[in-house]
Amino acid sequence: MKILLVCCAGMSTSMLVQRMDKAAKAKGVNAVIDAVPATQVQKVINDFDIVMLGPQVRTQKKNIEELAGGKPVVLIDMRDYGMMNGEKVLDFAIKTIEETK
């Protein structure tokens, strides 16, 4: 499972990636999780199963959906993002991927 997080600059989202990685290891989930700024999405989007947008780039959802070619593009819950709740964000990603298969 490959999860891409998208934000403005990558700083806060990289912290969320670390917490998601920790949660994945604790659950025994094999996941590759990475974060990129919105300006870099087009270069890497084909390598991921799901794209998760941070609250600060939610206005770019439609553009990113067009790049995604049918892959799920979802908004990270603002509260979960602000609290850096890696476990909840990971669970949301897993559930979304399973529902789109």
Image (spheres, helix red, strand yellow):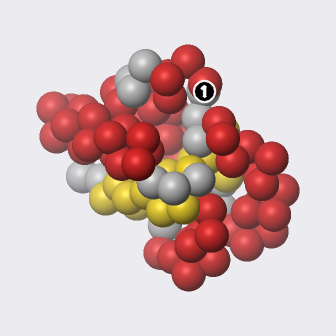
In the depicted view, which residue is nearer to us: 9 or 77? Answer: 9
Percent across and percent down for residue 56 are 66, 41
In the picture, the quarter occupied by the C terminus is: bottom right
> Is 7 placed above or below 92 here?
below
Local SS, label 1: loop
Q: Which residue is painted at 61% across and 25% down in the image?
A: 78
Percent across and percent down for residue 4 are 48, 57
In the depicted view, which residue is nearer to us: 2 or 36? Answer: 36
Q: Which residue is mark 1?
A: 77
Q: Which residue is painted at 24% across and 52% down in the image?
A: 30
Percent across and percent down for residue 41 are 59, 70
- Answer yes or no: is residue 63 visible: yes
Q: Which residue is painted at 59% across and 41% down in the image?
A: 54
Q: Which residue is painted at 73% across and 72% down in the image?
A: 67
Which amino acid type is marked by label 1?
A: Asp
- Answer yes or no: is residue 101 visible: no
Mark 1, other Cα within 10 Å: few <14 / some 14–19 / many ≥20: some
> Is 22 placed above or below 6 here?
above
> Is 37 placed above or below 11 here?
below
Relative to 7, 63 lies left or right: right
**Image-quadrant location for residue 29:** top left
In the picture, the quarter occupied by the N terminus is: bottom left
**Image-quadrant location for residue 15:** top left
Percent across and percent down for residue 76 are 59, 35
Relative to 29, 41 lies left or right: right
